[in-house]
Image: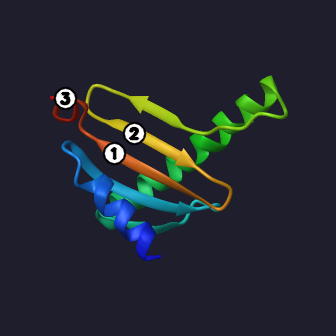
Amino acid sequence: MAEVDEAIKKIASHKGVVGTIVVNAEGIPIRTSMDNSTTVHYAGLIHQLTAKARSCVRDFDPADDLTFLRIRSKKHEILVAPDKEFFLIVVQNPSTAAS
């Protein structure tokens, strides 16, 4: 677990990162650097979106799988790294991260 904590700290230290969330396969937040209501909101919505994106990828090719999802809006950029048991959500400010 020390390796996981170290990796999350390294990601969180990047310029523009607003917060990080680690979510289990059921969409329940396990670790977060954001407040509780924001964490629950992001975890629920991103869990659904990730499941749908994974389903689309598998519809194209059943042997393939989703490895990364990037969503960019005017306000935030959301990076999702899904795995079998967990997935990592990173929320960042794209204008700060780019500079």
- Which disc, if any, is residue 78? 2
Q: Residues within 10 Å of mark 3 (few under 14, many from 20)?
A: few
- Secondary structure at numbered mark 3: helix
- Seen in the picture, residue 81 relative to 59 is either above or below; the reply is below
- The quarter in which the C terminus is drawn is top left
Label 2, label 1: how far apart the Cα atoms are: 5 Å
Amino acid carrying mark 1 in the image? Val
- Seen in the picture, residue 92 relative to 85 is either above or below; the reply is above
Instruction: Tell whether 8 sits left or right of 28.
Output: left
Confirm or deny contact between disc 2 and disc 1 (CB under 8 A): yes
Q: Looking at the picture, how far across and down is residue 69, in whole percent?
A: 52, 35
Instruction: Tell whether 64 sits left or right of 92.
Output: right
Q: Residues within 10 Å of mark 2 (few under 14, many from 20)?
A: many
- Secondary structure at numbered mark 2: strand
Q: 31 or 6, which is in the foreground?
A: 6
Q: How many marks?
A: 3
Q: Looking at the picture, how far across and down is residue 20, in whole percent?
A: 36, 56
Q: Tell me the residue at 38%/59% (across/down).
A: 39
The residue lying furthest to the right in this view is: 62
Label 1, label 3: how far apart the Cα atoms are: 12 Å
Q: Which residue is mark 3?
A: 95
Amino acid carrying mark 3 in the image? Ser
Q: Tell me the residue at 43%/70% (across/down).
A: 3
- Seen in the picture, residue 32 relative to 81 is either above or below; the reply is below
- Which label's residue is closer to the chain start, 2 or 1? 2
Instruction: Tell whether 18 sits left or right of 71.
Output: left
Q: Which residue is mark 1?
A: 91
Q: 62 or 51, which is in the foreground?
A: 62
Q: Tell me the residue at 83%/34% (across/down).
A: 63
- Which label's residue is closer to the chain start, 2 or 3? 2
Label 2, label 3: how far apart the Cα atoms are: 13 Å
